[in-house]
Image (cartoon, rainbow, N blue to C red):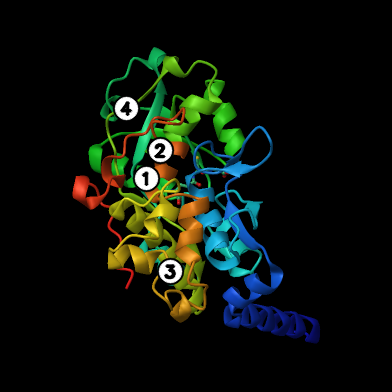
Amino acid sequence: MLNSKTILAGLLTLAGSLSVAQADTLQVVRDRGVVHCGVTTGFTGFSAPDSKGEWRGLDVDVCRAVAAAVLGDASKFKAVSLNAQQRFTALQSGEIDLLARNTTVTQTRDTSLGVIHAGINFYDGQGFLVSKDLGVKSAKELNDASICMQQGTTNENTLADWARANGVTYKPVVFDQFNEVVSAFAAGRCDVFSTDASGLASIRISRLEKPDNYVVLPEIISKEPLGPFVRQGDDSWLNVVKWSLHAMVAAEELGVTSANVDEMRNSENPDIRRLLGVTEGAGKNMGLDDSWAYNIIKQVGNYGESFERNVGQDSPLKIQRGLNALWTDGGLMYALPIR
Ligand SMILES: N[C@@H](CCC(=O)N[C@@H](CS)C(=O)NCC(=O)O)C(=O)O
């Protein structure tokens, strides 16, 4: 039965969510001087603290890019650690300004949670990691295997669908915390770890004592386009996050890097002049300084630099560009025109 206390609590929640939903996040971030960015609890290459406790990774570079665009300083972000279950609530409640954490874009997430994706920063797919001792060469041989996964991910349903379609039976072993899944797998409490292939590469290199004893199976069973999310109903903030991503890809397309960005300001190419804010008014429509993208490229680098440094050839993960190469190199990374 409704009593006055319940009604009051309901009204307060409604007022709270309305104020978050209606808030102008760009203004809030500017006033606060720090971007609150939702990341994982520690996922090497994508979002994890380095030896000095500084958060690093391809996803953290989205936080840094947004901080550089809005505040002129890529270090002005606070990483908020979130497991898979907590991430959307943290965004809905206003605890974070954006979620930049290996999150798959799906129609359900975009339409039922009050959140919306702002782009894709890594095209991925779900795969399987097994110990070589298991002697399995293909996921289709995994009959009756126990498969470790994390709660609140797309991975649970995707695996169930795939197993049904392929007549594979398995026993799901599911944990809430990432560390629990990793420990269970490392201790042999499950035969298989299933999540995004990027995650498997990261786990294999950074969390298992003898990475060479493990292998990622060839099957990729889904599309997992990963990207940052913001709250619905705040289009100017959506634009800031979305175009920060595009600026990084545009810079790579145009050959602008963190090393040559100052020199490139003298370029005659109108696309480069607009990107770097040499052309006046380049940031005006977004409510940003003209140097918004210059600041991203100077401090964070272009998309290719971020990729190689964090997860590619200059990192322990050594992930190939593959789908994440520029469209001109056979990949899917394609910057929308910045003009
Ligand atoms: N892309 C998938 C999976 C993302 C995910 O949360 N993966 C787990 C890997 S098992 C993870 O990143 N855990 C890190 C953590 O909770 O800190 C999704 O969006 O649901």
Determine whether label 2 and label 1 are within 8 Å by CB: yes
Real-space CA distance between mark 2 and mark 1, rounded to the nearest whole angstrom? 6 Å
> Residue 304, which numbered label?
1
Q: Which residue is mark 2?
A: 308
Q: Nearer the viewer, mark 4 or mark 3?
A: 3
Quick one: SS at disc 1? helix
Q: Amino acid at mark 3?
A: Gly
Q: Of the residues tagged 1 and 4, which is closer to the observer?
A: 1
Mark 4 to mark 2: distance in Å?
A: 23 Å
Q: Which residue, given by chain and number where applicable, does mark 3 sit on?
A: 277
The residue where tag 4 is placed is 217
Upstream in sequence: badge 1 or badge 3 = 3
- Quarter holding the N terminus is bottom right
Judged from the image, the secondary structure of the residue bearing numbered disc 3 is loop
Q: Residues within 10 Å of mark 4 (few under 14, many from 20)?
A: some
Q: Amino acid at mark 2?
A: Glu
